[in-house]
Image (cartoon, rainbow, N blue to C red):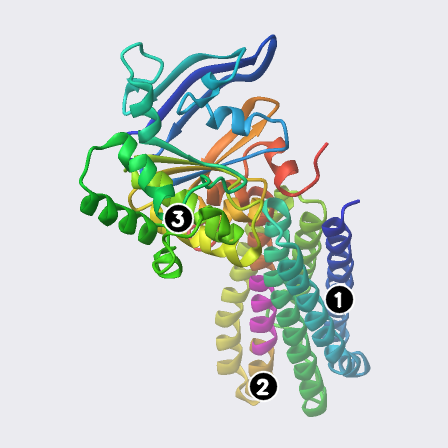
Amino acid sequence: MDAEPKISVRGLNFFYGQHQALYDNNIDIAPRKVTAVIGPSGCGKSTHLRVYNRIFELYKDQRAEGKVLLDNGDIFSSEINILELRRKVGMIFQKPTPFPMSIFENVAYGIRLHYSLDKKEIARRVEEALKGAALWDEVKDILNKPGMALSGGQQQRLCVARAIAVEPEILLMDEPTSAIDPVATVKIEELIGTLKKKFTIVIVTHNMQQASRVSDYTAFFYKGKIVEFDKTRKIFTNPAQKKTEEYITGRFG
Amino acid sequence: MIRIQKELCKVRQRFIEISSTVENTLKKTVQSVLEMDTKLAEEIIENEKIIDKMEVDLEEECLKVLALYQPVATDLRFIIALLKINNDLERIGDLSEHIAKKVLHISKKEKEMVPFPFNFKKMSSVTLSMLKKSIDALLSFNSQEAYEVLELDNKIDLIHKQMFRKVEKLIMESPQKTALMIDIVGISRYMERIADHITNISEDVIYMTDGEIIRHNRN
């Protein structure tokens, strides 16, 4: 990796109550690149991702140990403003989760939460975010319709618009296309390619072809450990670890 | 066994078919030269079409796996290596046919055969062992034998080079043998090219097993 890592994880352990889900995770996430996280169900991919914006803290009995540095600053430091951290580290989930409000309000909500701007500026930012999410052309005439009225793929792009409207630096995507059809999937994948010019992206995916198509780096997780982390091209042509090879070629277990 | 593995087994089976056919053809070619056996040479020419068909079949099988199963890692390298090796095998078939034609040409024109001005027996036995080694290396996923093939190719190049000087001298001594000598140069050159294709095969086997492209920059 040439540039300074955007995120550096060192010795990360994670616990659900008594149960340890992550073991000594170490990884550097490159800025303005796409890093894919792959591995079988229950291997800790999503758990790992949910540490980056401390969203796990919303749940009882979940605990992280170790260091996660964002631009060299410790995200667990007591000086961190959690709202600011979550603005910087946006998240997109498996199922599209539009708020029960209009398309416009879905995007404007976060902008109002983080910035005090006049109406015109908010409208400008909403438009910019919807354009950034490649959704503007489809919704510009129906901005007052409910977000829920959109198709699944459009809803997911609305979530992307909502995430990028608050000008984050990192986008975490947790299986962003597993609930949408192939055509919408292609759109999201293309979008990821555009978004990485501005944002650092970490994507959890079950779809290995998707990981190989969209990412620059790939981390393979197994039983809470990072088995292998390398350039995506290397992982999919000549992985160094036998376990990785077995997983990506489908000869697992 | 998962589906892609079953498909890869089929591909492997087709590869065994074409490689053993080519190996057999090369053996017969060598024999036809050593014994100036025109019957055998005709058989080789006749059977060339079989190899052509096998090449197309194997290629189609490989393309099918690529399109339908998106192989990665070892599976991907295996398919890519086979696609390329398939081509080299077919070329070896072609060159064997060329040699067989030379045999026919020589026996038609020459009433009296002279001993070859180079060690064809040595050249051909080294080439045959190279082919066997490179195919064994592929089937056993072991690059060791493939590296040995790269070494052996130097021997072939040397024999081929030395042959030129001897032929030159012979033509000066007995100009009436010039046409025969040209045919002999051809045979040596085809053999040398066959060895080059086998070298390519070995390089692809090394890519397949070790994931490293060693072509063009080896010593």
Please give the residue where the numbered disc 1 appears in the rendered image. Answer: B27
Q: Are marks 3 and 1 in contact (CB under 8 Å)?
A: no
Question: Which secondary structure dominates the residues rendered in magenta?
Answer: helix
Task: Check chain identity for marks 3 and 2: say if they share one.
Answer: no
Q: Is residue B93 left or right of residue A86?
A: right
Q: Nearer the viewer, mark 3 or mark 1?
A: 3
Q: Nearer the viewer, mark 2 or mark 1?
A: 1
Disc 3 element: helix
Quarter-of-image position of residue A39: top right
Residue A233's place in the image compared with B176, above or below, is: above
Please give the residue where the numbered disc 2 appears in the rendered image. Answer: B177
Q: In 3D space, how far apart are the residues under numbered discs 3 and 2 (Cα atoms)?
A: 91 Å
Could you tell me which chain the residue with mark 3 belongs to?
A: A
Residue A9's place in the image compared with B180, above or below, is: above
- The residues colored magenta run B186-197
Q: The residue under label 1 is which amino acid type? A: Lys
**Image quarter (top left, top right, bottom left or bottom right) of the N terminus of chain B:** top right
Residue A153 percent location from the top left of the image: 50, 52
Who is closer to the viewer here, A160 or A46?
Answer: A160
Please give the residue where the numbered disc 3 appears in the rendered image. Answer: A103
Q: In 3D space, how far apart are the residues under numbered discs 3 and 1 (Cα atoms)?
A: 75 Å
Residue in the image at 75% along x and 70% along y: B25
Residue A181 in view: yes
Q: Residues within 10 Å of mark 2 (few under 14, many from 20)?
A: some
Residue in the image at 36% along x and 45% along y: A161
Disc 1 element: helix
Quarter-of-image position of residue B99: bottom right
